[in-house]
Image (spheres, grey):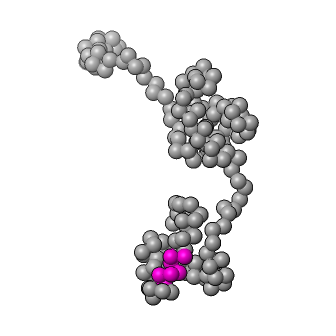
Amino acid sequence: MGRPAGSADKLEARRKKAISLIEQDELSQAEAARRLKVDVRTVRKWIAWHRGDGDRGLEARPAPGRPPRLDAAARKKLERLLVKGPRAAGFDADLWTCPRVAVMIRREFGISFHKDHVRRVLKHLGWSMQKPESRAIERDEKKIRRWVRERWPATKKKPKKSALP
């Protein structure tokens, strides 16, 4: 199902609500799961935690793993810098690339990321990889269609007439 959205406190409150619904309101595990919009297996896990450690078993825990090198404030600042564009960051083109973003992160935050990891950071911020439009802005589609219809047939090579009858 994936990790539910919300702060640790909200998730803890949800776990305690499930136990309350089951114990005080005498609902089934399936009904409590349906009301809280979680899988019944999740509710069973919460019940096991509660049986083992009481309310302490339902408390919020710190997220496992290494903490991110860019904290929430740094990610917000990074996004503001990205929105301003590469030229504002001192680059000579109007296109963000992962190596450019890595250089900017190193300059602004003193943190070195490999270009492949920068892609993950950008995805976490909701940014997607894009390629610039390869057509000229000045392109006139009507003129192109007219040229293809009127001039192109005259410029194409015609097959040679064969010597056979």
Residue stretch rendered in magenta on the structure: 16-22
Q: Which residue shows up at 38% across the image and 16% down it?
A: 138
Q: Is residue 17 magenta?
A: yes
Please tell me which residue is depicted at 66% across the width and 84% down the height of the picture. Answer: 52
- In terms of secondary structure, what is the magenta stretch mainly? helix
Along the line of sight, the residue nearer the viewer: 2 or 27: 27
* 34 w.r.t. 132: above or below: below
Left or right for 29, reference 8: left
Q: Quadrant of residue 95?
A: top right
Using the rendered view, name the quadrant where residue 91 is placed. Answer: top right
The part of the image, by quadrant, that contains residue 146 is top left
Q: Is residue 53 above or below residue 131?
A: below
Residue 157: x, y in percent?
35, 14
Q: Nearer the viewer, residue 89 or 116?
A: 89
Residue 22 screen position, x and y as percent? 49, 84
Residue 75, position as x, y percentages in the image:
61, 43
The mark tally for this picture is 0
| Residue at 72% across, 55% down | 66
Q: In the image, is residue 146 part of the stretch drawn in magenta?
A: no
Q: Is residue 129 above or below residue 14?
A: above
Residue at 52 percent across and 60 percent down: it is: 5
Q: From the image, which quarter does the C terminus lie in?
A: top left
Side of 35 relative to 97 (left or right)? left
Pick whichever, 39 or 163, lies toward us. Answer: 39
Residue 85 visible, this orientation? yes
Whether residue 158 can be seen here: no
- Residue 19, given in percent of the width and then of the height, sits at 53, 81
